[in-house]
Image (cartoon, coloured by chain):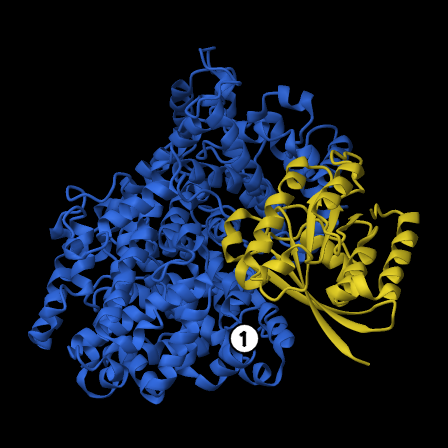
Amino acid sequence: MPKDILKVVIIGDGGVGKTCLRNQFIHKRFTSSYKATIGADFITKDVHTDDGRKVTLQLWDTAGQERFQSLGVSYYRGADACCLVYDTTNFQTFHNLERWRADFLKQSSLPPDLLEDFPLILIGNKIDIDDRVVSRRQARAWAQQHSSPRMEIRCFEASAKDGTNVEEAFSCIAGMVKIPQLEFDMDGSDSFHLNRRDDSLRGRKSCAC
Amino acid sequence: MELTYRERVEYFKKALEYDPIESELLPPEEAVIDMAYFREACFQGIPDEAGIRSKAWRVLLGYLPADKRKWKQVLSEQRRSYYNWVSELLNVPGDEPPSADHPLNSKPDSKWAVYFQDNAALEQIDKDVRRTLPDFAFFQLPVPKSPLNPLSPPIEEEDDNDEAAEAKKEMEGGDDQIDKSGRLFPFGLGRRPRSSSTASRKSTKSTKGNRSRSNSKSSVKSMGTGVDSSDPLTKISSPLNMVRRFSHALKGSPNPQQDINRRLDHQQNHQKEIDYTKYEIYPHILNRRSLFKRIAHLNKDFGAREHQDMKKAKAKKGGSSPIEDGSEEHLKVDNYKIQDLHWEAIERLLFIYVKLNPGVGYVQGMNELLGPIYYVFAQDSDDVEAQAHAEADSFFVFSLLMSDVRDHFTRTLDHDANTGINATMTRMSDQLKRLNPKLWRNLTVDKEIKEQFYAFRWITVLYTQEWDLPDVIRIWDSLLADRCMHTSSSATASQGIDRFQFLLDFSVAMVLCVTDELLVGDFAENIRLLQNYPISDLQVVLNKAYAIREKRMKLEENGGFMARDADDRASITSVDSVNRLKHLFNSESSRASWDRTRNSLDDMFRNSWVGNAGKRGSMLSVATTESAPPDMTSRANGMVRNLGSRFSLIGRRSANSLNEADYPASSFPAVKKDVQTPRTTTGPSKQANGPSVFERFSNFVANNHNSPLNEQPSLSTSERFKRDVAQQLGPNPTLEEEAALQASLAARTVMHDPSRQYRSQDQGYSGLI
């Protein structure tokens, strides 16, 4: 069985719950008292994609504060996918996604023609708190706006606290990344496969667009 | 120094013994601490006995001078400043009489604009400080009340023991987190691999009599409430009981000065218990909690979970919770009566720091640095006064520590070749390379593991996230003691992070202690290992670090860094070097660009010593094998680093651009002198190549407008520099921004010149640059 390693970078404002999401995904646990991440934390997890591939996710959970962004280059380089996280109860964190995305693409040292199609997903965290200020529609609109014909930004609303959609979001990355970009267009079965997954998710709690 | 533990304790006790009145009368030989010996003693670890470390750190960081006769004055002045800042800087615009200023005023200097800006910083601080050492109950506990602490609420009769008892009950009961961490508390006793500590500690502890209240560090109960009710003796002598008596006098007294007088009067009546008269009393600061009010609305959305918990807790307690929550009605109550929690004290302290250091601002991780300092000071159960002023003293000690490490927190210096976090990590990597080239190659070349992946956090927060607090405190003993230890011996006084050589020694030791595991693991395994450091016995790593330090110091005595660099280079053929340079130059990353400047500058220096302008092709081997005297080259390297750091420090210190008035050439006598040396030794051939980089650099620093580079056809350094500054700054830069940018640009701008020289002199290198 071929083993793939996918490097996934998790970015977003400080305090949106990047570390909590990652921990919920890896350890199925939640604590509200994580320390601020300094630099970047690294963790791996093996996942099985729907088509039976075994994929090792290398998650880089980065620091949220702006100050650390200039150091991003060493963490971003060679990434296969990027996970943009915002806090559904804090509009500013959603607003800043624009900057995070631009900054990531700029620092990732990708060839310019691939930038558009770079696999991104969007996670709105903290939906367990009934104090939402960023609507699903807004998130979907943002994703739509930044998707390209060959790369559709999927969006999830998740809760690191109760685990809602966390697994789904991360396995979505595993599924979408290693399919070479061209196959998205040319290989109908693969893309169909993904779409089918989308439908099943949409039926549940995600806001897959 | 081969002393027994007991002797060491005695030494520290004697060295640091202090009484506000008696110490002023000491003869000089007893009053002045022999710093060299003291540092050496601290380096081996400061005993955990009450009161020692807290004073020792104050001395090590230079907050207290070596002369104990000056302590009283220093402490009084500094503490007073801090309390003044607290009362001034925490002012809320709306609290003042109405003025023309309005919340919607958009002018950048509007009081409200500043206020909103501050709130953003405060919000960020709040998020992090709440999470300071989350698995450690201490920071969630209330600051003990003390009549000496103006940030302590005025205490009323009924507060006293009932509240203490209630708080105690609370702690022992339901709350899982506190209960759990309560067990973590007695760390000072068993965890340390120092075997003698437990026994001797017990024997020396009981002699304090009734001067101090509970000395028990391990009792979470006495920490939280200031009263250990199980012991009738301490009950009588506890300051809380003292205060209870003062509080009669305090009631209904609106005038703080009057307050103090009456408090002092009362104290005199009770001198038998604790002599408070010898301590200075500062007026209460009534707005000390206004900053928590400012961001109360935020706590609703940020830690909403926490917020709900707090509400629950409050409901249970019938509103007597010392924890302030965001609820409106609560805010209307006079909240100066509320007892601060320890993390709130840290939050206030950081806010004051940010207000006073806008150029640095708040950066995540500062709270981690503050944790050990504040903890050590607030836990000092030996000295009533020091404990009461833990917050103020922590502020100054933290500021002093930050002045050394703030380059790590400054974004504009991230890619600076001499200072800043990446430069420090490169130096660490260099040291690793020297000590274990095989491991170094395996990590950085074969697996491409960058130091950023693991050492960034180690170095930025000084290991506070890698080790448990007791271990961190022990590491810091050595770190702080090693700081400045060698300034007297080296030709150029070290600055900033250069003082923390042991920081690198220890980082390298951490890597070397897991060499075997690293060599067999793959990329992911290595990173996991280094980020979740597997060794829990600190002594193992410390011993390694000590050995590395020994080695380093020996090498430094014999000629320093460059001698070793030269050895390394000698093993690499010049073809390799060229390839390496090529690789660096081709890479577009900024890391490479500063590597390049670093390398080229280093080479340039070596080269200029040799003075072999015509033989550039072989310059590396020439420089390394024969011609360059090791001490010379070592000095060169040291100077580059020094000039850079000194320059950037100056740049930041001064708001106005670097003009002569601020930095007279005389402030760099050592530099100037050193600059001359190589030139005279290298002979006249050097003269033809124009001024040396050193000279240009120091000239540039000293005399910005009169750069010797003016002869060059392109823009002169200073012109380019000014242009760059103007380009990169917005229309209304803050002074600090401007200065910081200037500093980083200056370093870069000047560094570029040597590479230009290459181009003109050696065609072989022109393709690379």
Residue at 40% across / 58% down in the picture? B420
Which chain appears blue?
Answer: B
Is residue B486 in view? no
Q: Compared with residue A142, is residue B59 higher up or lower down, i.e. above or below? A: below
Residue at 74% across / 49% down in the picture? A123
Residue B689 on image: x %, y %: 14, 69
In-front residue for pair B175/B663: B663
Q: Compared with residue A205, is residue B33 higher up or lower down, i.e. above or below? A: below
Q: Is B693 left, or right, of B51 in this rendering? A: left
In-front residue for pair A40/B716: B716
- Chain under disc 1: B
Is residue A115 in view? yes
Q: Amino acid at mark 1?
A: Glu
Residue at 24% across / 88% down in the picture? B625
Residue A90 on image: x %, y %: 68, 37
Name the element at disc 1. loop
Residue A203 on image: x %, y %: 93, 48
Residue B692 on image: x %, y %: 16, 65
Q: Compared with residue B52, is residue B638 higher up or lower down, i.e. above or below? A: below
Q: Residues within 10 Å of mark 1 (few under 14, many from 20)?
A: few
Find the residue positioned furthest to the front. Answer: A186
Q: Which color was chain A given?
A: yellow
Q: Give the residue number, with chain letter if any, for mark 1.
A: B448
Res A194 quadrant in image: bottom right
